Image: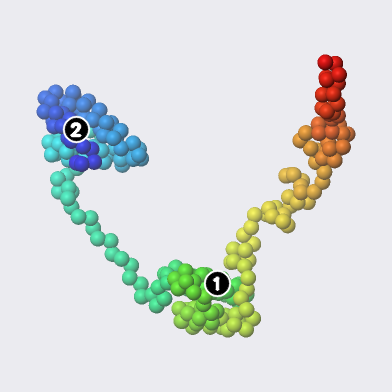
Amino acid sequence: MKEYGSNIQKLVDNIVNIEDREKRTRYAHILVELMRQIHPNMKDGQDYYNKLWDDLYIMSGFTLDVDSPYPPPSKEALGRKPQQVPYNMHNLRYKHYGRNMELLIDKAATIEDPEEKRAFVSYLARLMKTFYATWNKESVEDETIYTNLEEMSGGRLEEDLQGIRNGGMIEGTPRERTGDRREGVGREGGYREGGGNRPYGGNYPNQHGGNRDGGRRGDGGHRGQFRPNNRDNRGNDRRRR
């Protein structure tokens, strides 16, 4: 196997020719650890060590007889083509919106509350407009989005779309309208007026001592301490000389 190099293959051939089974097993474990160090970026785990032992058996031509923690792989499994995964072929009329948009439309059609349903349809229209701009790289009219949404829903959202045409879209995402927010956080939360965390208003002492005004005016702050005039000190030194 090219990923381990010719030197590892020579070591495998040497281990196979060892007559003592216990010694052969010990060398096989050492060789597996060496194979792991060759690719240190690989994740350590049970599946990875199983792969290393499988590679060791494959490089030995399935002739290695040692006490390994994993059973040797079968020769029939080597070179077998994987099973083909069928591709989901959905008959999408507008492929740039995707399959998830159809699922969201089905969800919107089952909402009973008229106000909530109209808000959900408004959210879908804005989302479809974003997908359309990503696909076409051009501006799109709202009426085009409404027409596509009406066709994709099979007429189930016709009444809601007519209400959006007349009264406009309802702002806000479905999560925001259902009240799924963190209480006490934000501009209107309890942190601004209540206790707990530090409120936004009030006077706080300066880190250097005293408040900000007192520290600057010399009322006990570090910044307000008297500093001698360096120019006068230099003059006194010259007179002494």
Q: Is residue 160 above or below residue 14?
A: below
Q: Which mark is residue 126?
A: 1
The label nearer to you, 2 versus 1, is 2
Query: Quarter of the image containing the C terminus?
Result: top right
Q: Secondary structure at mark 1?
A: helix
Task: Please state which of residues 61 and 240 is positioned toward the viewer in this rendering.
Answer: 240
Amino acid type, callout 1:
Arg
Query: Quarter of the image containing the N terminus?
Result: top left
Can you give x and y, in whole percent of width and height, for residue 213 in the image? 85, 40
- Of the numbered discs 2 and 1, the one sitting upstream in the chain is 2
Per the model, the C-alpha gap separating discs 2 and 1 is: 61 Å
Q: Is residue 192 above or below residue 71?
A: below
Q: Secondary structure at mark 2?
A: helix
Q: 73 left or right of 202? A: left
Mark 1 surroundings: few (<14), some (14-19) or many (≥20) residues within 10 A: some
Q: Quadrant of residue 56?
A: top left
Amino acid type, callout 2:
Asn
Can you give x and y, in whole percent of width and height, for residue 220 in the image? 86, 31
Task: Please state which of residues 96 and 67 is positioned toward the viewer in this rendering.
Answer: 96
Can you give x and y, in whole percent of width and height, for residue 218 in the image? 87, 34
Q: What residue lies at 74% left-to-right and 44% top-to-bottom?
A: 198
* Residue carrying label 2: 7
Q: What residue lies at 60% left-to-right and 72% top-to-bottom?
A: 119
Q: Is residue 111 above or below residue 229?
A: below
Q: What residue lies at 28% left-to-right and 64% top-to-bottom?
A: 86
State whether residue 54 appears in this view.
no
Q: 107 left or right of 34? A: right
